[in-house]
Amino acid sequence: MSSTTTTSSSLNSQRKSRDEYKKEKELEEARKAGNAPAELDEDGNEINPHIPQYMRQAPWYVDTNKPSLKHQRAFNKKEEVGKGWYQRGAAAQGFTATKYRKGACTNCGSMTHVAKDCCERPRKVGAKFTNDDIKPDEIIQKLEFDYDSKRDPYNGYDPSSYKEIMELYEKADRERKKKKMEEIIKSHKGEENINAEDLTKELEKQEQEQDVYDAENVAPIQKLDPKSRTTIRNLRIREDTAKYLYNLDLDSAFYEPKSRSMRENPLPNTNPNDTRFAGDNFTRTSGDTNKFRDMQLFAWEAQDKGQNVDISSAPSQAGLLHLEFLKKKEQLKEQSKKLLLSKYGGEEHLLNGSNDGSNNNNDISIPQTENYQEYSASGKLIKGEEIVVKSKYEEDVYLNNHKSVWGSYWENGSWGFQCCKQTIKLSYCTGEQGRKLKDNLIIQNLLKNNHNDNNSSSNSDNNEEKEEEPKSLLEQHLEKSNKSTAKEKEEKKKEKKEKKEKEKRLEKALKEQDEINSKSIEKDERKLKYNSLKNDNYQITDEDMEAYNLKRKRSDDPMANFKDSIDE
């Protein structure tokens, strides 16, 4: 009963009347407005009146019935640990031993470590036996580190040690500048009135150019990805268009996302001068790749001939040998050219000119045009129109005195000229007379052919040669049409005969197949001889196969065993 009375009395004491609650609210509003002084905690610190009640009010297990914010602070906060470090090589001051002590290091005589952990140079005879040069005891420190100081890579780092590195780099920079200045002085050796200021300005200019080249123009060829531990290749600048966005058609060039490569041209039908990306295979046939390919071929051919040339193990040696090979090849070409010119002549028609080295520009002129064209550094057309050659052959060229081009006329599988109907390329034009002669020859050839055909037909019928007069073109046409109709009639008769014979053979084969099925002859194929199927008994015709397919039983047919009640 006593416990219940105490709790009820405490609850009654905590309860506030209506007036007390109203006064407390008014005081709180006045504090927020700044008209009343702020509330003080146990330590005498002001409590911000704008802090909400759920933060100001302490829980029941920490409540002291006094205004305080201690329950919001960490109660188990540890003291800050100093970020010290071990004193490297520091020895204990004061006492220094002169004789070996029991339990000390047998090598140096120090008491703070054992011979196994000794960092001194191993002595031939240890301090245990000589009592000479006994080292002082080291200071053993026990430092306590928190989480961050344990993992701090610069904990214990001495910043003054970096001065040595800076001095080394500055010294190297001074030597580099000195060497560059000597090169500049050598380049201006013959000139006069050169000041030291001009030389320093030139040196500064070269350094600025070098800095710009290092910073902007040199792009990273490959980058290391720390997550995947692999090198990232074929990186593009973010401003450039991605390869897979040039052509969004699904049937266009294949893009491999793993290696970021698109080997084929994504826009094959566009003008090659306007395309910004022609596929990765385009780079394989441009630049130094052709030189490397030629060098690789040279190495393979040399190995086949017994020479020890390997481009992978000794690339510089292979390159030098390839250069020597090319020089010798050019020399041999020059020798063969000189021999041909000395034997047959014609040196004056060459572009290089005579032996004196003078160019005969009057004889051979380089083609020139007045069309203005402007190109960028990358070779792309900026202004003007680029003339694209449509064909590898010369167009609108009239040979000799012909009035039409070669290939404008066709006769009996050979090309010719339309103006004179000649089929010889380097012939001269004969004009209208030549055309008439050609037409007459064609007519005569046609008449001869028809005459020979008629003679052959008459010889086969009568076995006698009879000369007939030449017929007109209309008569010839009518004869041919009559012959064709007669041939068609004969062919139709033959087809009808063949069809009837085939039907007869099929009926005969069906009857034989019925007899075989009724007799149910079963032959054991294992007893047949090797070449027994080649006999006449086993010569199967198309009609036999058709009869077999019509009469054979099909187990997979659902209507095979069906019997109609009407038939019964």
Image (cartoon, helix red, strand yellow):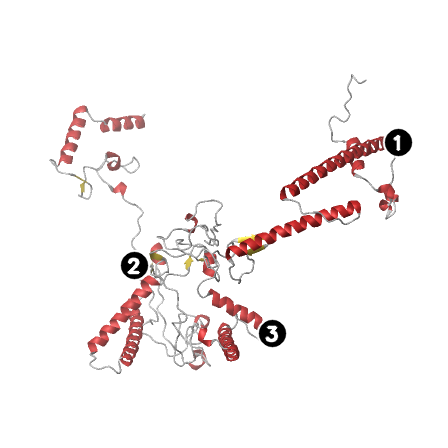
Residue receiving disc 3 = 305
Q: Are marks 1 and 2 in contact (CB under 8 Å)?
A: no
Q: Are marks 2 and 3 in contact (CB under 8 Å)?
A: no
- Report the Cα–Cα distance between label 2 and label 3: 77 Å
Of pointers 2 and 3, the one earlier in the residue sequence: 2
- Report the Cα–Cα distance between label 1 and label 3: 77 Å
The quadrant in which the C terminus is found is top right
Residue receiving disc 2 = 82
Q: Where residue 215 is drawn, which disc sits there?
A: none
Between residue 349 and residue 560, name the one nearer to us.
Answer: 349
Residue receiving disc 1 = 519
Q: Would residue 301 be visible to someone looking at this image?
A: yes
Q: SS at mark 1?
A: helix
Between residue 525 and residue 83, name the one nearer to us.
Answer: 525
Answer few, some or many: residues within 10 Å of disc 1's Cα (few below 14, many 20 plus, some between 14 and 19): few
| Residue drawn at 39 percent across, 53 percent down | 274
Between residue 120 and residue 266, name the one nearer to us.
Answer: 266
Q: SS at mark 3?
A: loop
Toward which corner of the image does residue 32 lie, by quadrant? top left
Marks 1, 2: nearer the viewer: 1
Question: Where 508 sits versus 93, above or below?
Answer: above
| Residue drawn at 18 percent across, 24 percent down | 18
Q: Position of residue 443 (x, y in %)?
A: 61, 50
Q: Residue furthest top?
A: 566
Q: Position of residue 91 (x, y in %)?
A: 34, 72
Marks 2, 3: nearer the viewer: 3
Which amino acid is tagged 3?
Answer: Lys
Answer few, some or many: residues within 10 Å of disc 2's Cα (few below 14, many 20 plus, some between 14 and 19): few
- Report the Cα–Cα distance between label 1 and label 2: 114 Å
